[in-house]
Every structure is written in C-alpha cells, then in structure tokens.
Amino acid sequence: MDTKLTLKLSQEIIEKAKLYASSKKVSLSRIVEAYLQSITSDEKNEQVKLSPFVKSLSSGLKLPTNLDYKNEYAKHLNEKHQ
C-alpha cells in the first residue's frame, strides 16, 4: 500500500530533482522510494543486482586483505618506465 509523504526541501533541489527525474523518464516519487529502499535494506537479505556487463568484469581473483595496492602500483610503474 502506498502512503503519501510530505517533505520540506529547498526549491533549487526540487527543480533539479524534477529535471533529473524527467530526463530518466521516472517519477520523482519512484527515485525517492528507490533511494530510501537502498539505504534501509537489510544487506543480509537483499543482494545488489549487478548488470551483466559489471559481472563480466569480475576476474574471480581473490586478493589478500593486507595487499598494499599503492606500493604494488608504484612497483609496476617503476618496472614499466625503466
């Protein structure tokens, strides 16, 4: 069941939000609802839905938790530019 909610926001934000919603062809109410759903969802019960493209980027490689990526990248750049 949908319930009405009244919010107080600055006029500038409302206008920008309406333009954004219009450009995405979705209602402002739907955007607010989706945002509130995303910040209040129980992470254990709801998984983030990834697009097939994002899924295709995953290598399946498990990185060590103590990996110093800045140091590793610096080493890579040193080797590359010698």
Image: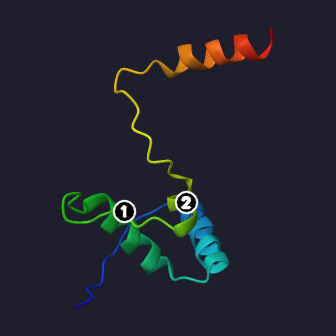
Q: Which residue is mark 1?
A: 48
Q: Where does residue 78 sit, x and y in percent of width and height?
A: 71, 10
Question: How far separated are the C-alphas under marks 1 and 2?
Answer: 15 Å
Residue drawn at x 37%, y 27% as measured from the top left: 64
Tell me which corner region of the image, top left, top right, bottom left or bottom right, holds residue 65.
top left
Disc 2 on helix, strand or loop? helix
Q: Earlier in the sequence, mark 1 or mark 2?
A: 1
Please state which of residues 8 and 17 is positioned toward the viewer in this rendering. Answer: 17
- The residue at 25%/61% (across/down) is 40
Q: Amino acid at mark 1?
A: Val
34 horizontally vs 14: left or right: left
Q: Residue placed at 26% from the left, 85% from the top?
A: 3
Q: Residue at x 45, y 63 (%)?
A: 9
Mark 2 burial class by Cα count in 10 Å: few <14, some 14-19, many 20+: few
* Contact flag, marks 1 and 2 (Cβ < 8 Å): no
**Quadrant of the image containing the C terminus:** top right
Label 1 or label 2, whichever lies nearer to me, is: 2
Q: Is residue 32 left or right of residue 36?
A: right
The amino acid marked with disc number 2 is Ser
Q: Mark 2 highlights which residue?
A: 56
Quadrant of the rendered image containing residue 73: top right
